[in-house]
Amino acid sequence: MPCDFLLSCLNLEDTKQRQSRIIDKELHKQKRQLRRQMKILLLGAGESGKSTFLKQIRIMHGDSFSDYAIQEFILTIRQNVIMGMKVLLDARRKLGIPWKDPLNEAPSKRVFNCDVQLAVEPNNFCQNFVPAICALWADSAVKLAFERRREYQLGDSIKYFLVELPRIGLRDYKPTNLDILHARKATKGITEYTVAIQNVPFLFVDVGGQRSQRQKWFQCFESVNAILFLAAANEYDQVLLEDRQTSRIMEACAIFETIVNNLVFVEVAIILFLNKTDLLEEKYQRCLISDFLPEFLGNPRDIKQVKDFLLGIFDRCRKDRSKSLYHHWTSVIDTQHTHQIFSYVRDEIRRENLRQIGLY
Ligand SMILES: Nc1nc2c(ncn2[C@@H]2O[C@H](COP(=O)(O)OP(=O)(O)O)[C@@H](O)[C@H]2O)c(=O)[nH]1
Ligand SMILES: [Mg+2]
């Protein structure tokens, strides 16, 4: 009996030592990984494309979304459709645009007054709302209200979802990656995502961009290797959702100015993404930049001049003129292009980190 007791004590001791060795090894591994880890902070105003870029990183590295996440995206997409149509209907009425087909008045009231929670319920959405919303979108009055969207606040993905509604409205609808990239849900708080890229652990930190969310940014500033600052290049004619008067592009510049000149980031690679290039290219001809930014003195129908001007606004914010500004024209809903851009970005971060230690 005493011998058994002794044996079990020894075994216990052995197990404890083994556990302690495993913990030590794990801690050592974590420390090593932390030293090698690249922490990348995504910053920029609300709706500049930060969370979309992060989704793109997941997609690019083959990290598929769980069934639960897919169901969440379906819900978000339905919410985007209902809320987007409500905004359009409100705008049509306020702008006094008459219906092409007056019979659309009744379904319009039904959609406008609906409870969103109930409307996104699968049967209700597919049977009652999709046909009505398709008919409303087909009316030229809603299209006209859409054309005047700079006069109110409409998300950039609403058109995509309305055009795709016959597919999205099917009972067995499964979102494609492109649908997921268009799904808009404002980020609250801080989201982190880690992925190993060519054996280097990358930690991406995504934050809410709207004014109310920005006081949380400083919590993420420690041991950052790079900041990807996103600015929506298409929003030169738009005002902020938060106060409905400040120019969106000027707000983006003001935030960039505080980040790029901040002493906390002297050793951090800051890379500017002038994002939503697809929407800029679709917009610049019909919505002349010179009408909104009188400082623009070039030819507003020349995309190169428009881009140079927009880049110049951000570039001039920088006080340290000793190095040039890393920047890319991006459209982060485009997987292939973003993949390419991200490989350049990795090189730039590497180069910048070497420069910091005097090796470049
Ligand atoms: N067309 C287009 N839409 C974009 C692009 N980047 C983001 N979006 C859309 O813009 C909206 C806001 O993007 P999101 O990533 O949520 O912005 P965040 O607030 O900075 O995180 C979403 O509906 C995105 O699908 C882009 O490059 N092109
Ligand atoms: Mg976000």
Image (spheres, rainbow, N blue to C red):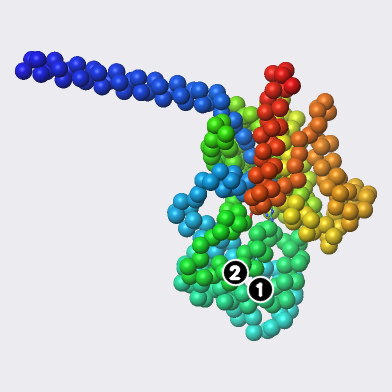
Disc number placed over residue 137 in the picture, else none = 1
- The residue beneath circle 2 is 165
Residue type, numbered disc 2:
Leu
Q: Quick check: can you spot residue 109?
A: no
Q: Residues within 10 Å of mark 2 (few under 14, many from 20)?
A: some
SS for callout 2: helix
Where is residue 5? Give x, y as percent.
11, 18
- Residue in the picture at 59% in, 61% down: 80
Pick whichever of labels 1 and 2 is earlier in the sequence.
1
Q: Nearer the viewer, mark 1 or mark 2?
A: 2
Q: Is residue 103 left or right of residue 252?
A: left
The quarter holding residue 348 reads: top right
Ligand 1 within 8 Å, label 1 CB: no
The quarter holding residue 255 reads: top right
Establish if 133 lies above or below 175.
below
- Residue in the picture at 56% in, 28% down: 37
Disc 1 to disc 2, how far (Cα)? 10 Å
- Residue in the picture at 76% in, 39% down: 327
Asked whether the beta carbons under mark 1 and mark 2 sit within 8 Å of each other, the answer is: yes
Where is residue 56? Give x, y as percent.
60, 47
Q: Residues within 10 Å of mark 1 (few under 14, many from 20)?
A: some
Residue type, numbered disc 1:
Trp
Q: Is residue 2 left or right of residue 275?
A: left
Q: Residue furthest left?
A: 1
Disc number placed over residue 58 in the picture, else none = none
**Number of labelled discs?**
2
Image quadrant containing the C terminus: top right
Q: Quick check: can you spot residue 32?
A: yes
SS for callout 1: helix
Ligand 1 within 8 Å, label 2 CB: no
Residue sitting nearer the eye, 256 or 203: 203
